[in-house]
């Protein structure tokens, strides 16, 4: 892993993600910056920047005006925004944005205590309670996100101020937990993966040691949070320290075999574990990560790549429990699954990990943000009924329209940082190989690896052709290219300059080896046939139902396209499904699907002995990621199917 070349020299080109790159740069980051400064009219208050100002003033003068506002982990919103801004600056230099980031970083430095400690909640509100409530207070979680921001900002801009600040905080944590022997581990994992990034950036072994400490200690004393609560007389929100599933601490991590509890915490933990396994060669840890990943993706993941079935605890529940209308399916959890899958892909080169990254990205993550970049979903249900969704006691979390911001605003900046760093997941540059995992159009500078540039040209996911062009510094460049062949593509064709080539296909990747000139073009033609998706009969919510997929995209039906009544609609089993031409002016550019189906007319009575009348109809489907962009609307992914 030490030889891994981070994908920082990538220029997004024409194609699907070009719009998102511009959206993040021009709309999302400025909008979120305003939200962090409480400048969005009608939106939930953030107070993030003001919290740092108050902390800085208190450190300087001993007192501050006002009180801390927001979640105990409010600092992390600023961290994720800064990380997203760093990636954007690497792609699109912007002196004004960089200056504003530098100013925020200076403010963060002013809010840091002399011993390196950094957390505005404890500096402003609870200065005498540091490190006494690891279960609830999220000190290590906030530190982790700010460490990630520091590493990203240093790598993308070359500026080390935030890195210096967070090395100070990491050193403080090391002293407290390693040198002074303080007990405990994070209530909310995150710092484990962050410390691995910090180690890789700085080469300081103590940061890897600290990451391994938190991983290895977790669950060894499964009663730690119970004992911790007995020692303190305060709480953040009265969380149950005995709920070991929720906190993934019921057993040491190497003995865990099912993904349980809070879904975001789980996949952040597993990401750190997989990264540590990759760096240390710990095969036992690798096997545990493989087991947990399989449990998630084969028994506890929605067809959209969403995870977390229950509002209670934002959590995994049981195998095959995947309710559609009450799904929690937090945007952050899908992002965390992408992080975890990406690390697993480094551990073992199997296309199934990239397939899951793609599924979560194109469906759940993109659905988490309005197409205009100014509204966001925390929860991503697979069925929405206005009047019930967002209103019934059991469905209040499943909003039918995206809010401008949240009191708990972890998801919006998480989307921004993922989309602005998409190249990290699309490409893996390792010694002796270039892996093309996700088909994102753009140019990758490989001058220091393979002596030139590679450009991926595509209109994917709405077109089936992926083209690789080469720009060698000399006459040719040798590129050992591994291209993912998605599991949904039944018939895939690979050509070099129009001639079909034979290549090794292994674990979902096609391996090509060649010296390429500027005239050479490798073309991959994927099978974008519409596929019907069925679940195991163990998933009770989907009995007699079907989902529709084309390429990586899951489709859904919305009321606005189907007479404002999707509940009476079913699809004809084995009926024809046709694909529209590309519609550039609809939902920022999509292709609709048109399926043969039926519409039932039933009695207005709640219960009736009269059989429904049925007539044939055409059912219109749109990509799931676009739902909820046309006002209050019904939506359904899993649709009844009839002969």
Image: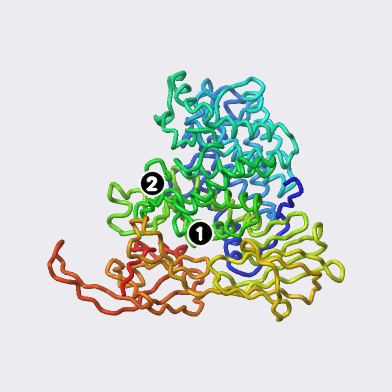
Give residue 283's quadrant in the image.
Answer: top right
| Side (left or right) of 264 relative to 441 | left
Q: Which residue is mark 1?
A: 366
At label 2, counting other C-alpha atoms closer than 10 Å, the crowd grade (few under 14, some 14-19, many 20 or more) is many
Q: Secondary structure at mark 1?
A: helix
Of all residues, the one furthest to the right in this rendering is 474
User: Where residue 104 sits in the image (x, y, percent)?
Assistant: 62, 41
User: Where residue 622 sits in the image (x, y, percent)?
Assistant: 43, 69
| Side (left or right) of 301 relative to 109 | left
Above or below — where is 259 with respect to 113?
below
At label 1, counting other C-alpha atoms closer than 10 Å, the crowd grade (few under 14, some 14-19, many 20 or more) is many
Residue occupying the point 40% across, 52% down: 320
User: Where residue 516 sits in the image (x, y, percent)?
Assistant: 80, 71
**Residue 196, label in figure:** none
21 or 261, which is in the foreground? 261
Mark before the other along the chain sequence, 1 or 2: 2
Above or below — where is 452 with respect to 253?
below
> Is label 1 or label 2 in front?
2
Q: Secondary structure at mark 2?
A: loop
Of all residues, the one furthest to the left in this rendering is 609
Residue occupying the point 61% across, 69% down: 15
Residue occupying the point 48% across, 30% down: 135
- Tell me the quarter of the image containing the C terminus: bottom left
**Residue 310, label in figure:** 2
User: Where residue 437 sits in the image (x, y, percent)?
Assistant: 63, 61
| Side (left or right) of 69 relative to 565 | right
């Amino acid at each position: 892993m030490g030889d891994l070349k981070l994908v920082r020299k990538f220029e997004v080109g024409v194609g699907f993600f070009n719009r998102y790159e511009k959206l993040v740069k021009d709309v999302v980051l400025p909008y979120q910056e305003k939200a962090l400064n409480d400048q969005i009219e009608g939106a939930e208050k953030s107070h993030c920047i003001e919290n740092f100002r108050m902390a800085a003033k208190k450190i300087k003068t001993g007192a501050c005006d006002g009180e801390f506002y927001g979640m105990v982990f409010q600092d992390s919103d600023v961290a994720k925004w800064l990380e997203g801004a760093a990636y954007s600056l690497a792609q699109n230099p912007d002196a004004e944005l960089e200056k504003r980031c530098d100013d925020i970083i200076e403010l963060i430095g002013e809010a840091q205590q002399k011993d390196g400690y950094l957390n505005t909640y404890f500096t402003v509100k609870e200065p005498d309670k540091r490190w006494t409530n690891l279960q609830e207070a999220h000190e290590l979680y906030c530190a982790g996100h700010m460490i990630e921001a520091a590493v990203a900002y240093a790598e993308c801009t070359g500026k080390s101020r935030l890195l210096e600040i967070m090395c100070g905080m990491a050193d403080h944590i090391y002293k407290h937990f390693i040198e002074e022997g303080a007990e405990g581990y994070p209530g909310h994992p995150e710092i484990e993966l962050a410390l691995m990034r910090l180690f890789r950036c700085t080469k300081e072994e103590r940061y890897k040691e600290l990451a391994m400490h938190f991983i290895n200690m977790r669950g060894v004393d499964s009663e730690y949070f119970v004992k911790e609560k007995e020692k303190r007389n305060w709480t953040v929100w009265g969380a149950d320290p005995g709920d070991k599933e929720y906190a993934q601490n019921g057993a040491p991590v190497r003995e865990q075999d099912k993904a349980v509890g809070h879904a975001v915490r789980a996949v952040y933990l597993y990401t750190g574990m997989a990264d540590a396994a990759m760096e240390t060669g710990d095969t036992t840890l690798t096997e545990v990560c493989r087991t947990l990943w399989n449990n998630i993706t084969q028994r506890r993941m929605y067809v959209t790549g969403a995870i977390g079935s229950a509002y209670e605890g934002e959590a995994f529940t049981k195998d095959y429990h995947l309710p559609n209308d009450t799904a929690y399916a937090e945007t952050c959890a899908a992002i965390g699954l992408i992080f975890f899958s990406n690390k697993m892909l480094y551990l073992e080169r199997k296309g199934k990990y990239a397939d899951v990254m793609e599924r979560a990205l194109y469906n759940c993550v993109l659905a988490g943000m309005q197409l205009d970049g100014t509204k966001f979903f925390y929860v991503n249900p697979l069925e929405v009924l206005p009047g019930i969704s967002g209103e019934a006691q059991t469905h209040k979390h499943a909003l039918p329209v995206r809010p401008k911001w949240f009191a708990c605003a972890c998801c919006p900046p998480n989307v921004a940082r993922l989309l602005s760093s998409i190249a990290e997941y699309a490409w893996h540059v390792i010694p002796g190989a270039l892996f093309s995992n996700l088909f994102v159009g753009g140019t990758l500078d490989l001058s220091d690896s393979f002596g030139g540039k590679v450009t991926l040209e595509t209109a994917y996911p709405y077109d089936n052709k992926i083209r690789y062009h080469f720009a060698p510094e000399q006459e040719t460049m040798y590129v050992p290219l591994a291209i993912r062949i998605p599991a949904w593509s039944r018939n895939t064709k690979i050509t070099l300059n129009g001639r079909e080539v034979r290549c090794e296909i292994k674990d979902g990747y096609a391996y090509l080896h060649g010296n390429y000139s500027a005239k050479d073009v490798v073309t991959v033609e994927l099978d974008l046939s519409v596929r019907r998706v069925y679940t195991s009969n163990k998933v009770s919510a989907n009995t007699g139902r079907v989902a529709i997929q084309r390429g990586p995209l899951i489709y859904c039906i919305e009321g606005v396209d189907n007479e404002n009544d999707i509940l009476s609609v079913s699809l004809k089993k084995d009926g024809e499904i046709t694909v529209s031409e590309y519609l550039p002016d609809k939902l920022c550019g999509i292709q609709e699907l048109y399926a043969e189906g039926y519409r039932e007319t039933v009695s207005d009575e709640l219960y009736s002995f009269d059989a429904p009348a049925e007539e044939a109809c055409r059912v219109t489907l749109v990509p799931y990621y676009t739902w909820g962009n046309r006002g209050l609307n019904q939506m359904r992914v899993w649709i009844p199917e009839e002969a």
